[in-house]
Image: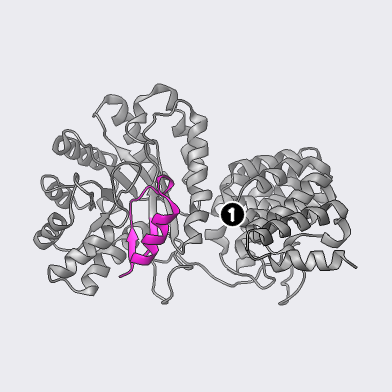
Amino acid sequence: MTAEERLAVLVGEVRHDPAALPRVSARAARVVGRGPGLDGRRIEDVARSRLLVAACETAGPDVAADVVAGQYAVGDADERRAVLMALPDLEELGLGDGAVPVVLDALRTNDTRLVAVAMGPYAAAHLPADAWRHGVLKCLFTGVPLASVAALDARRDAELDRMVRAFAEEREAAGRDVPEDALRLLASADH
Amino acid sequence: MRIFDPHIHMTSRTTDDYEAMHAAGVRAVVEPAFWLGQPRTSVGSFVDYFDALLGWERFRAAQFGIAHHATIALNPKEANDPRLLEVLDLLPRYLEKDGVVAVGEVGFDSMTDAEEKVMVRQLELAGEHDLPVMVHTPHRDKVAGTRRTLEIVRQVGLPPERVLVDHLNEKTVDLVDDAGCWAGFSVYPDTKMDEDRMVAILDRRGLDRALVNSAADWGRSDPLKTYRTGRAMLEGGYTDDDVDHVLWRNPVAFYGQSGRLLLDDVVDDAGDFAGNTLQRGEPLAPGGSQGVPTAGSEG
């Protein structure tokens, strides 16, 4: 069986019983595969994201936010990353702001695997401005490339520029390097 | 020297330790769930502890080039607190996770009925989740505790090669060898076992089915005891390959029985790790259920 076929079997299990999602997600990497995929995402992330989408589709739009919160709560860090990655795909199920608490939880960690994914398109669309700005700043602090921040140009504002400038000045005062991403952002703010 | 420490409590250690371990050759560890010194009072604190073992600690180790795995269980001491028995209900969820390579530490502390009941249930869980078991032997009344532990393992019916009995010494190693289980040795600054005694035991019984660990935690302990034991082996006339046998290949062989070792990021050579690496690089369509993305397509 190919990886795609092995994943299809797992998706079938979840569609049959959405409550099986935690168990199926836990072993997804061992069954489907692990490691870099063709599109820059890891195979296990893609597999687990699709399992979550399948569970939400089966459980129904009213409870999509509960399924997301439940799976995030019982998942390990890899599984949580997959939950965060799946959020844009759940928009059409009417997720709305329902997964904001999960994104905020990920941004409270210092785990860069989670922080990077948390600032994706769902965060761009749903995070309140203050939380979103602090998310960008957290990326700079923890070394997550700003390329991970979806819609950076569209959502940035004068307040974010001020915060990044203050961050850069603090680093300079300490004689420390300022991340390239921060300098680039500030350079474009000056125009 | 490449080193796999099969028993070390990294949540109790600093980043300096991680740096020193990597410099000494440590590339992989197993962190068994255990007692934290301060007894816990609720199931919730076990949830956070288990999550930390599989989340933050694995991330922290990776920052220093060390692959981190865990064993999960309700430890013998806290098995005596009735408020914590519901931890057993959490275990099936955790025992399915990647990087959980055994049930453990289980075993005896004071050899109470409660401890025995919890141990038996967890040995059964190991069978149900197809995992090896890591058994702690008691510090007090160790010979009797080891003997009773081996009886229970036999009664539950677990294959002995899937059971590691840890913290052994000169008085208990033969019992474990005779039972066909793996023998674990915790090399400490001044208590359980030391480097020279360890080499003497290896001289006598050979290198197979022996795991040497530092069991470093929040007590007086040394995360480089695995390395120091390797040095003592070399000084005692063993070869580099013998040291690799004990400090790397043995733990890989024991914990590899789980099929869940995650060593790809820390091992350069294309060795066979007991089938723990699966189908790297096979494509999956990121969004929908069909189709294979071409390289560079949008995720």
- Establish if B163 lies above or below A186: above
Amino acid of disc 1:
Asp
* Image position, residue B182 (x, y; %): 24, 53
Give SS at disc 1: helix
Task: Magenta stretch: give its range.
Answer: B1-29
Specify whether residue B114 is painted magenta.
no
Q: Is residue B27 magenta?
A: yes
Give coordinates of residue A136: x percent, y percent.
75, 55
Residue under numbered circle 1: A78
> Which residue shows up at 10% across the image and 59% down it?
B200
Relative to B161, B61 lies left or right: right
Tell me the residue at 32%/54% (across/down). B223
Residue shown at the point (40%, 22%) measured from the top left: B82
Which residue is depicted at the point 31% across and 65% down?
A: B248
Question: What colouring method underlies this structural image?
Answer: one colour
Quarter in which the C terminus of chain B is drawn: bottom right
Q: Position of residue B286 (x, y in %)?
A: 72, 64
Give the chain letter at badge 1: A
In the displayed structure, B233 sits above or below B168; it is below
How far from the left and from the top, in percent, is residue A78? 59, 54
The one nearer the camera, A125 or A6, is A125
Would residue B116 be seen by someone viewing this image from the given angle?
Answer: yes
Residue furthest right as drawn: A191
* Foreground pick, A183 / A36: A183
Which quadrant would the N terminus of chain B be assigned to in this image? Answer: bottom left
Instruction: State whether residue B38 is above or below residue A174.
Output: above
Asked if B31 appears above or below B253 in the picture, the reply is: above
Left-right relation of B204 to B213 = left
Residue B55 shows in the view: no
